[in-house]
């Protein structure tokens, strides 16, 4: 109170009521931050700006910004990203302690807008809340889909696609005017492997050809929308802004295209009644038919699991697992 009184005495008397309200508001924010800081024993935190918190300290490459901040504030730091308090872990030892010792406490994660739209209300294995359903889905994915024995079945697919890739590069280099777009060729090879492992067929065959509706184009669009800045994820009370900017309408339009694509592929697989289908979709449909699952695998659940493997998890995993 003494500090507040001294500040008020130093203010010019000719200030208007609007200026006084502004000063009182700033003092209120400072006192609120001090009270919160004293109430909880929080990790170190960089200086924050009212309303936006530490968002101004994140550049176009947030992982590099986190790395730079960790050198100054330590491997465990608290950031205020808009209205969302965020704990950032930059040490492998601390992350191991969290995962092993405090796994249940940190098992839930925020469900961003993109995950709610593309994950059928977060029914996938990546963003579903911790509980019995989460445990059963994780168990099914580990045992039935991602075990070492299952993944080794895809070795021939990887070998075939890589062989075709090397031959295509050789042919391009042997032409009169060699011009090789390695980015497109590597992305096409990766999409080919992922599509054949998850859906049991080539990507563009499964998605109806090339162009804006191709499997590769949809995958790139989904990844772009997942990484786009969504105001509602950092300021929940301002979620309506994403409708005005067109972000959510674009997400929903892309989701409808992917949903129609998955419906078509699943319907074709069910009508063909193929045996010995080792693709992820084939395995899940067989488990659904046999009733061997300990949770209800609805159509939306099935598509949500396929979605996360097609466009998020498997493109990294399947290329490195031996």
Image (tube, rainbow, N blue to C red):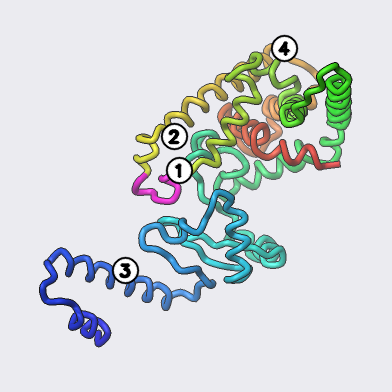
Q: Main secondary structure of the magenta part?
A: helix
The answer for how far apart the CA atoms under marks 4 and 1 are is 41 Å
Measure the alpha-carbon separation of dots 3 and 2: 32 Å
Residue at the image point whose x is 70% and y is 21% from the top: 203
Q: Residue under label 2, please give it.
A: 247
In the image, which is nearer the foreground, mark 4 or mark 1? 1
> Of marks 3 and 2, which one's residue comes earlier in the chain?
3
- Compute the Cα span from label 1 to label 2: 8 Å
Can you say which quadrant of the picture contains the C terminus?
top right
Q: Which mark is residue 230?
A: 1
Asked if residue 54 is among those painted magenta in the image, a careful observer would answer no
Near mark 4 (Cα within 10 A), the count class, few <14, some 14-19 or many ≥20, is few
Residue placed under numbered mark 4 in the picture: 272
- Asked if labels 1 and 4 touch by Cβ distance under 8 angstroms, the answer is no
Q: Secondary structure at mark 3?
A: helix
Part of the protein shown in magenta: 231-238
First in sequence: mark 3 or mark 1? 3
Residue 43: % across, % down: 54, 72
User: Residue 84, image x and y in percent?
Assistant: 45, 57
The location of residue 196, given as percent across then percent down, is 76, 25
Asked if residue 160 is positioned above or below residue 47 in the image, the reply reads above
> Which of the two labelled residues, at mark 1 and mark 2, occupies the earlier sequence position?
1
Please tell me which of labels 3 and 4 falls first in the chain.
Answer: 3
Give how far apart the Cα atoms at labels 3 and 4 are: 64 Å
Q: Position of residue 313 (x, y in %)?
A: 68, 40
Q: Is residue 234 magenta?
A: yes
Res. 29 mark = 3
**Compared with residue 150, is residue 128 higher up or lower down, i.e. above or below?**
below
Sequence order check: which comes first, mark 4 or mark 1?
A: 1
């Amino acid at each position: 109170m003494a500090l507040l009184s001294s500040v008020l005495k130093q203010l010019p008397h000719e200030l208007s009521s609007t200026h006084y309200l502004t000063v009182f508001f700033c003092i209120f924010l400072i006192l609120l931050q001090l009270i919160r800081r004293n109430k909880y024993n929080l990790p170190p935190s960089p200086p924050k700006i009212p309303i936006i918190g530490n968002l101004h300290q994140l550049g176009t490459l947030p992982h590099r910004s986190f790395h730079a901040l960790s050198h100054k504030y330590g491997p465990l730091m608290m950031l205020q990203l808009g209205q969302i308090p965020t704990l950032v872990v930059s040490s492998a030892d601390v992350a191991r302690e969290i995962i092993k010792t405090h796994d249940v406490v940190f098992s839930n994660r925020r469900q961003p807008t993109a995950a709610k739209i593309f994950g059928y209300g977060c029914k996938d294995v990546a963003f579903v809340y911790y509980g019995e359903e989460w445990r059963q889905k994780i168990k099914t994915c580990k045992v039935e889909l991602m075990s070492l024995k299952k993944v080794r079945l895809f070795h021939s697919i990887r070998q075939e696609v890589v062989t075709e890739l090397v031959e295509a590069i050789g042919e391009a280099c042997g032409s009169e005017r060699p011009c090789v777009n390695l980015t497109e060729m590597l992305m096409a090879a990766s999409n080919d492997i992922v599509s054949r492992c998850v859906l049991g067929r080539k990507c563009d065959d499964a998605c109806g050809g090339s162009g804006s509706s191709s499997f590769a184009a949809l995958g790139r669009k989904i990844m772009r929308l997942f990484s786009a800045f969504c105001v509602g994820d950092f300021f929940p009370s301002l979620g309506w802004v994403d409708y005005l900017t067109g972000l959510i309408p674009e997400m929903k339009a892309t989701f409808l295209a992917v949903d129609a694509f998955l419906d078509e592929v699943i319907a074709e697989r069910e009508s063909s009644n193929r045996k010995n289908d080792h693709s992820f979709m084939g395995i899940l449909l067989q488990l659904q038919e046999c009733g061997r699952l300990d949770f209800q695998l609805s159509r939306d659940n099935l598509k949500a699991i396929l979605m996360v493997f097609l466009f998020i998890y498997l493109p990294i995993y399947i290329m490195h697992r031996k």
